[in-house]
Image: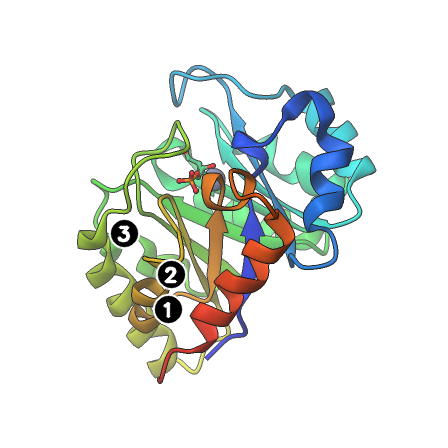
Amino acid sequence: MSSIQICPSILNADRANLPHEISRIASDADWLHLDVMDAKFVPAFTFDFNECAKIIAASTLMVDAHLMISNPDDVAPEYAAVGAKSVTFHLEASTTPSQTLKAIRKTGSRSGIAIKPDTPVVELFEFMDYADMFLIMTVEPGAGGQSFMRDMMPKVRVLRDLISQNKGQQWIQVDGGITLDTILEARLAGANAFVAGSAVFRADDPGHMVQALRERAMSAQL
Ligand code: DX5
Ligand code: ZN
């Protein structure tokens, strides 16, 4: 199965002091997960495109952009163009998902497509040829610090089985409520990329927490 990727989300970090926050996880994390919210697709607003471009340029970690925005089709490849090495948009917000995935890939970045908890996993199947990552939301998108929805695990299992049958290399990411108590369950279901916001940035030592999450995920007997 694909290698483990730990992706701390800066949503609940000290956003006024991002370089410092990033430095606390830079040698332990695989990606910096950047939650982009536009106050339309979700009620909250985080960063506009120019702010994201600055964060991406300044990050010593590769950026995994999670676009919780309406109308992502034109702008998603722009995030890749300014340096995000992975760009994920929501199926529910897209009118041309296959083309958008292809356009992201064309830049050399990884293409990702996400579904909210109410969206059936079967809706992702047709993107097997165009997506490098599928994001199964394990909370309702929009805020950090919510509880892990373990009833999303069957979606992860179904998708992992399909990827295995196709001998695919796609990653499965889970986002929301990932902690030391939940990461193993998500790993056992077949996820390999784990977003963790509050678990990491509310820890006394965020770098150490990233290591602990990785070790817990690696302890899975698959
Ligand atoms: C929620 C965001 C998440 C959020 C996760 O809409 O997509 O990335 O930061 O936060 P935790 O890990 O606290 O659930
Ligand atoms: Zn996210």
Closer to viewer: mark 2 or mark 1: 2
Q: Is mark 1 on a helix, strand or loop?
A: helix
- Image quadrant in which you'd find residue 54: top right
Q: Please name the residue that numbered disc 2 is placed on.
A: 183
Q: Viewer-proximal residue, 135 or 30?
A: 30
| Side (left or right) of 105 relative to 118 | right
- Vertical side of 125 occupied by 25: above or below: above
- Please give the name of the residue rendered at 26% of the width and 68% of the height, measured from the top-left corner: 157
Closer to viewer: mark 2 or mark 3: 2
- Vertical side of 98 occupied by 163: above or below: below
Percent of width and height locating residue 190: 35, 70
Comes first in the chain, label 2 or label 3:
3
Label 1: few (<14), some (14–19) or many (≥20) C-alpha neighbours in 10 Å: many
Q: Viewer-proximal residue, 215 or 46?
A: 215
Label 2: few (<14), some (14–19) or many (≥20) C-alpha neighbours in 10 Å: many
Which residue type carries mark 2? Ile
Q: Do the residues labelled 2 and 1 touch (CB within 8 Å)?
A: yes
- Image quadrant in which you'd find residue 46: top right
Residue 123: numbered disc: 3
Comes first in the chain, label 3 or label 1:
3
Residue 127: numbered disc: none
Percent of width and height locating residue 155: 24, 59
Quadrant of the image for the C terminus? Answer: bottom left
Quadrant of the image for the N terminus? Answer: bottom left
Q: Please name the residue that numbered disc 1 is placed on.
A: 187
| Side (left or right) of 182 relative to 64 | left
